[in-house]
């Protein structure tokens, strides 16, 4: 019993060191951001429900807004299960979409951010080249809403996966391993080629699944439904051509 | 024409891509804080719905796992209802994308082919990176490369020809047909509800087939909730104890 409790105390030592350093840094800079970072790092290191609430409370104190605390309490309760069943998850998705219409006055769309990211990459390499390309006058190389959205999706998915214990490094997905073999090189090359095709197709059509299909269909625009049907047909045909024998894969959890 | 630039020059370019007016307010179409908040919520939903996984999305196109359909139909139903309700109340505005028929059919076919191979759409590729799937890194690199290829080599030629084939402008169905949009919404809601019921019945049918033909294959993970193994174990253990009891009683009476 005594050994166990001393081990528990020893586990707390890095967290205490991080907290102490963050307090010192906060006082030195007269700014709260090191402490916010420290609480977040401790949460990622060892996630638990009370750390979620403490994190939300810290953000509430420093941002002078009640929303982080409310959000963290809700997330501490709802975020613990490993998955939500499809219909509740779909309703939550719909609420996020409508909230995006309300807060940011635009539908969610990811591909625009990736296009702007490639414009920024070209700008950082060669600024003079930007003026020659007509398309980059529509998608200017400036950090904008969609890039913040991408950063938010990465962080949200990471925190959620870490909190419910789903996070794990994975190089090749299980079903790919069953139908195409465990080679990492093969998977990554195929993914890169498919990514090029997808980025090109998204630019032709004018959006991706979230930007054109969902936000088009919910506003009753023909483009969303056209894109949905052609995507489904293309996907099923390619699956039957590409996987052939290995199409039935037994899934185990 | 790659040339090494000095650090100062590079920092100047970095400062150039950032616009300080984007971090002034939370609301508004260009606010970075708004994007971060929406993104956090969106990432949590994508992860909890298990959309950020190759297995789920690929299972849809292999006709084995209909999680995406069962998740997608309520998205469309609820958000269509809410968006039109709030628009009619004057709280939000519609942002209608442009409809160009031929490029969108071609783009959809190519996009579907890429999803079938990759197993991610752009949003879920980004979410999968947060979940620890390292194969999202080449996916994001490929998406950026595809956009750059289109912008550099194809846009100038195609913007006048191919991208205008079948252009009918940025109109909704209600504006094209000139009727009240609520008729269309009710029609869509009924159809979507029927579709959802059909999907659920398809899952039940899979369970039925599995039980009748005794297939020991887990085709979807939806089956796991419906056949709890714990019940079987408890039943067998109960029957065993009953049998032991009977044996003991028989032994006692025989003696």
Image (tube, coloured by chain):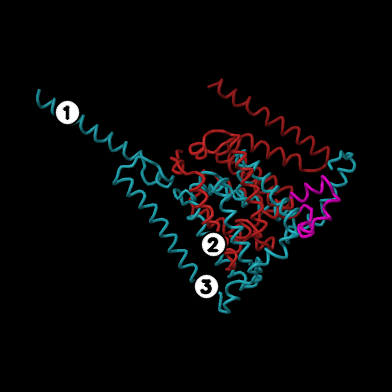
Q: What is the display colour for chain B? A: cyan
Asked if the magenta segment contains residue A138, the reply would be yes
Task: Please tell me whether mark 1 or mark 3 is closer to you in this view.
Answer: 3
Q: What is the display colour for chain A? A: red
In this view, the residue in front, B72 or B115, is B115
In terms of sequence position, does the residue under pointer 2 or pointer 1 come before the other?
2
Cα separation between marks 2 and 3:
13 Å
Asked if the magenta segment contains residue B57, the reply would be no
Above or below, B234 against B96 in this view is: above
Q: Which residue is mark 3?
A: B184
Taking the image as shown, residue B236 lies to the left or right of residue B246, namely right
In terms of sequence position, does the residue under pointer 1 or pointer 3 come before the other?
3
Cα separation between marks 2 and 1:
61 Å
Q: Are marks 2 and 1 in contact (CB under 8 Å)?
A: no
Above or below, A9 against B185 in this view is: above
Q: Which residue is mark 2?
A: B76
Percent of width and height locating residue A252: 45, 38
Are discs 1 and 3 located on one and the same chain?
yes
Q: Which residues are magenta?
A: A117-143
Quarter of the N terminus of chain B within the rendering: top right
**Residue in the image at 79% along x and 53% along y:** A141
Cα separation between marks 1 and 3:
70 Å
Q: Residue furthest bottom?
A: B178
Chain letter of disc 3?
B
Q: How many marks?
A: 3
Q: Are marks 1 and 3 in contact (CB under 8 Å)?
A: no
């Amino acid at each position: 019993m005594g050994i166990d409790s001393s081990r528990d105390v020893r586990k707390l030592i890095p967290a205490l060191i991080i907290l102490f350093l963050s307090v010192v840094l906060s006082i030195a800079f007269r700014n709260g951001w090191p402490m916010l970072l420290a609480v977040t790092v401790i949460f990622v290191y060892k996630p638990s429900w009370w750390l979620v609430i403490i994190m939300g409370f810290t953000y509430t104190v420093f941002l002078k807004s009640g929303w982080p605390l409310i959000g963290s309490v809700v997330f501490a309760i709802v975020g613990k299960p490993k998955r939500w069943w499809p219909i509740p998850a779909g309703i939550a998705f719909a609420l996020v979409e409508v909230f995006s219409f309300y807060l940011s006055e635009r539908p969610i769309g990811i591909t625009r951010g990736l296009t702007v990211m490639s414009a920024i990459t070209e700008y950082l390499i060669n600024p003079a080249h930007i003026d020659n390309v007509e398309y980059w006058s529509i998608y200017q190389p400036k950090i904008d809403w969609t890039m913040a959205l991408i950063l938010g999706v990465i962080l949200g998915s990471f925190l959620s996966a870490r909190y419910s214990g789903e996070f794990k490094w994975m190089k090749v997905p299980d079903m790919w391993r069953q139908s195409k073999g465990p080679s990492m090189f093969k998977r990554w090359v195929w993914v890169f080629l498919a990514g090029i095709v997808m980025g090109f197709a998204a630019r032709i059509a004018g959006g991706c699944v979230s930007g054109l299909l969902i936000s088009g269909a919910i506003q009753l625009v023909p483009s969303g439904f056209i894109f949905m049907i052609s995507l489904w047909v293309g996907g099923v045909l390619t699956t039957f051509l590409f996987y052939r024998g290995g199409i039935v894969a037994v899934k185990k959890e | 024409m790659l040339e090494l630039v000095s650090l100062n020059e590079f920092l100047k370019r970095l400062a150039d891509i950032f616009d300080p007016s984007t971090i002034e307010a939370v609301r508004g179409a260009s606010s970075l804080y708004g994007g971060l908040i929406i993104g956090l919520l969106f990432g949590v939903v994508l992860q909890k719905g298990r959309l950020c996984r190759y297995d789920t999305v690929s299972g849809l196109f292999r006709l084995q796992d209909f999680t995406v359909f069962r998740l997608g139909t309520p998205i469309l139903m609820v958000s269509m209802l809410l968006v039109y309700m709030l628009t009619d109340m004057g709280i939000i505005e519609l942002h209608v994308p442009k409809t160009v028929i031929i490029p969108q059919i071609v783009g959809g076919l190519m996009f579907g082919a890429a999803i079938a191979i990759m197993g991610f759409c752009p949003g879920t590729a980004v979410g999968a990176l947060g979940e620890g799937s390292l194969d999202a890194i080449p996916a994001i690199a490929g998406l950026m490369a595809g956009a750059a290829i289109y912008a550099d080599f194809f846009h100038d030629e195609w913007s006048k020809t191919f991208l205008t084939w079948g252009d009918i402008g940025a109109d909704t169905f209600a504006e094209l047909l000139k009727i009240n949009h609520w008729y269309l919404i009710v029609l869509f809601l009924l159809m979507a509800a029927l579709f959802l019921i059909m999907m659920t019945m398809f899952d039940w049918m899979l369970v039925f087939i599995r039980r009748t033909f005794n297939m020991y294959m887990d085709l979807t993970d939806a089956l796991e909730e419906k056949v709890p193994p714990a019940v079987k174990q408890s039943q067998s253990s109960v029957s065993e104890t009953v049998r032991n009891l009977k044996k003991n009683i028989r032994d006692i009476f025989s003696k």
